Amino acid sequence: MKKVQVLGTGCPKCVQTAENAKAAAAALGVGIELVKVDKPVEIAKFGVMFTPALAINGEVKVSGRVPSLDEIKAWLKA
């Protein structure tokens, strides 16, 4: 099971990123542990300057935009 972290303070784009992650996992039939990181101090520990951001198993995959379903699927497959 992969740990998927959505970094952001809860803005609509952050919510959309979390929804896309859930949908991508469901489409692939894989289980994920979805964690929302919403404290600025915790977000900064990832080196992220712009939200939303998405990390998989602690590795930031995208920052500053909502990733597409296909992007997230590819990252979950890897």
Image (cartoon, grey):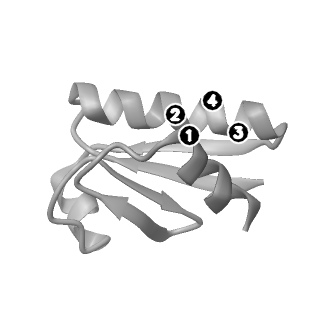
* Pointers 2 and 1 in contact (C-beta within 8 Å): yes
* Pointers 4 and 2 in contact (C-beta within 8 Å): yes
Give the camera-side residue of 6 and 16.
Answer: 16
* Pointers 4 and 1 in contact (C-beta within 8 Å): yes
Q: Position of residue 28 (x, y in %)?
A: 80, 40
Per the image, the residue denoted by label 2 is: 20
- Quarter containing the N terminus: bottom right
Q: Residues within 10 Å of mark 1 (few under 14, many from 20)?
A: some
Q: Nearer the viewer, mark 2 or mark 1?
A: 1
- Cα distance in 3D space between marks 3 and 2: 9 Å
> Mark 2 or mark 3, which is nearer the start of the sequence?
2
Q: Is residue 35 left or right of residue 6?
A: right
Q: Amino acid at mark 4?
A: Ala
- Cα distance in 3D space between marks 4 and 2: 5 Å
Q: In percent of the image, x 74 and y 31: which residue is there?
A: 26
**Helix, strand or loop under label 2:** helix
Per the image, the residue denoted by label 1 is: 69
Q: Position of residue 75 (x, y in %)?
A: 62, 61
